Image: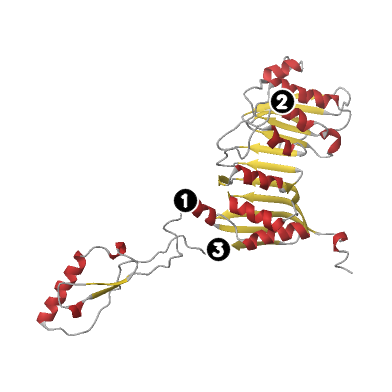
């Protein structure tokens, strides 16, 4: 009975699920209302063998030697020190002959590596792909959580995304989606994943709020194309901040499309934060005019960094160029809703507009 009706049963709620990487170890943390638990996943695969080639343990013997034998042993030790390093010899069990008689040959053991050990031919990218790809077990654990629980917040931090990682996620999730309220991808590297694979990963996500913060190695992974940005138009919260290399994201058309329908669709605030964009003064003023034209309560928070936005021109458009800011912000009153006020200010992050009592988070 329970199995037949499992689809209608309320799922367990996970407040936050975090996956972070630390020295090729992957730490998965689960945070519920009454539970905080973490697991560490690590595949012990050595990138190259660490043998002490050519080294012998020095042992002390108690053998009594005559004078001739003692002199002969000293000569052998001197000759041994003059021999080339055995580390450069083939991976075989060999004997290094001395100039003395054959019964005093010095055995040197060099490890014989199997043919399937390809550490010496593995290039940099292959090694990084292997070191920074989570195990199949971890990917299956993630897929299980998203199938069987409701997850509010997913945070991926300090990861090195790889093509193999995305392939494993796509395989284990199947038709399932990374479905949650909010997703944050922060302080991750994109050097070892192709833009195509990273876009496939983003398409696997279904959320209302998305933050892409401090991502390094961005080469068309996050770009300004309409096709790419169209994936974010349905979000109520979008933050793209501190990309390396830096790239301008969004223009006036994107800003208008992002705000379209948000006043009635979302009861919560609408947030857009982009630290480097092509949005102009005209596009920013149109966003303020759109807020003025709504006759419903709309919590709006926007922060745009752009060299094409001039705060003085915005104040002139709003007839606020003669006004003085109060507590660091200009106040824009709503023409139809007297209780609604929009705050306007600028700082190092860009130009802000935010509903009174709210700030960009």
SS at mark 1 in the image: helix
Question: Which picture quadrant has residue 340?
Answer: top right
- Per the model, the C-alpha gap separating discs 1 and 2 is 42 Å
As displayed, is residue 335 above or below residue 183? above
Q: Residue at x 64, y 58 (%)?
A: 28
Q: Look at mark 1 in the image and give the residue it sits on.
A: 124
- Mark before the other along the chain sequence, 3 or 1: 3
Decide if residue 150 is on the left or right side of residue 61: right
Which label was assigned to residue 43?
3
Q: Position of residue 328 (x, y in %)?
A: 69, 26
- Per the model, the C-alpha gap separating discs 3 and 1 is 18 Å
Decide if residue 92 is on the left or right side of residue 225: left
Closer to us: mark 3 or mark 1? 1
The answer to whether mark 1 and mark 2 are in CB contact below 8 A is no
Residue 255 visible, this angle:
yes
Tell me if mark 3 has few (under 14), some (14-19) or many (20+) residues whose alpha carbon lies within 10 angstroms of its own: few
As displayed, is residue 217 above or below residue 131? above
| Quarter in which the N terminus is drawn | bottom right
Q: Position of residue 168 (x, y in %)?
A: 64, 56
Question: Which picture quadrant has residue 151?
Answer: bottom right
Question: Which picture quadrant has residue 51?
Answer: bottom left
Q: Look at mark 2 in the image and give the residue it sits on.
A: 252
The answer to whether mark 3 and mark 2 are in CB contact below 8 A is no
As displayed, is residue 287 above or below residue 194? above
């Amino acid at each position: 009975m329970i199995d037949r009706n499992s689809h209608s049963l309320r799922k367990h709620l996970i407040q936050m699920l975090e996956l972070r990487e630390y020295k090729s170890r992957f730490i998965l943390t689960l945070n519920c209302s009454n539970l905080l638990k973490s697991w560490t996943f690590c595949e012990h695969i050595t990138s190259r063998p660490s043998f002490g080639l050519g080294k012998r343990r020095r042992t002390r013997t108690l053998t009594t030697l005559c004078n001739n034998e003692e002199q002969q042993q000293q000569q052998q030790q001197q000759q041994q020190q003059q021999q080339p390093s055995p580390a450069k010899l083939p991976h075989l069990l060999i004997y290094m002959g001395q100039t003395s008689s054959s019964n005093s040959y010095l055995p040197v053991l060099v490890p014989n590596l199997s043919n399937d050990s390809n550490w010496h031919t593995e290039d940099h990218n292959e090694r990084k792909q292997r070191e920074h790809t989570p195990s199949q077990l971890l990917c299956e654990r993630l897929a299980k959580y998203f199938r069987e629980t409701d997850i509010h917040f997913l945070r991926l931090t300090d990861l090195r995304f790889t093509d193999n990682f995305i392939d494993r996620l796509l395989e284990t999730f199947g038709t399932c989606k990374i479905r949650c309220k909010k997703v944050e991808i922060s302080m991750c590297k994109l050097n070892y994943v192709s833009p195509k694979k990273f876009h496939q990963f983003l398409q696997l996500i279904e959320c209302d709020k998305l933050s892409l913060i401090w991502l390094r190695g961005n080469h068309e992974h996050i770009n300004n194309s309409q096709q790419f940005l169209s994936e974010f138009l349905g979000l109520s919260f979008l933050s793209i901040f501190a990309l390396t290399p830096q790239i301008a994201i969004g223009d006036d058309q994107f800003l208008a499309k992002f705000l379209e329908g948000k006043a009635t669709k979302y009861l919560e605030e609408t947030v857009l934060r982009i630290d480097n964009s092509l949005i102009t003064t005209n596009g920013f003023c149109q966003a303020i005019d759109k807020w003025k034209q709504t006759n419903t309560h709309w919590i709006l928070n926007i922060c745009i960094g752009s060299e094409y936005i001039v705060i003085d021109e915005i104040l002139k458009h709003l007839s606020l160029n003669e006004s003085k800011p109060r507590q660091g912000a200009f106040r824009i009153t709503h023409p139809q809703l007297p209780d609604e006020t929009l705050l306007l200010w600028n700082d190092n992050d860009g130009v802000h507009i935010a509903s009174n009592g709210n700030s960009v988070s």
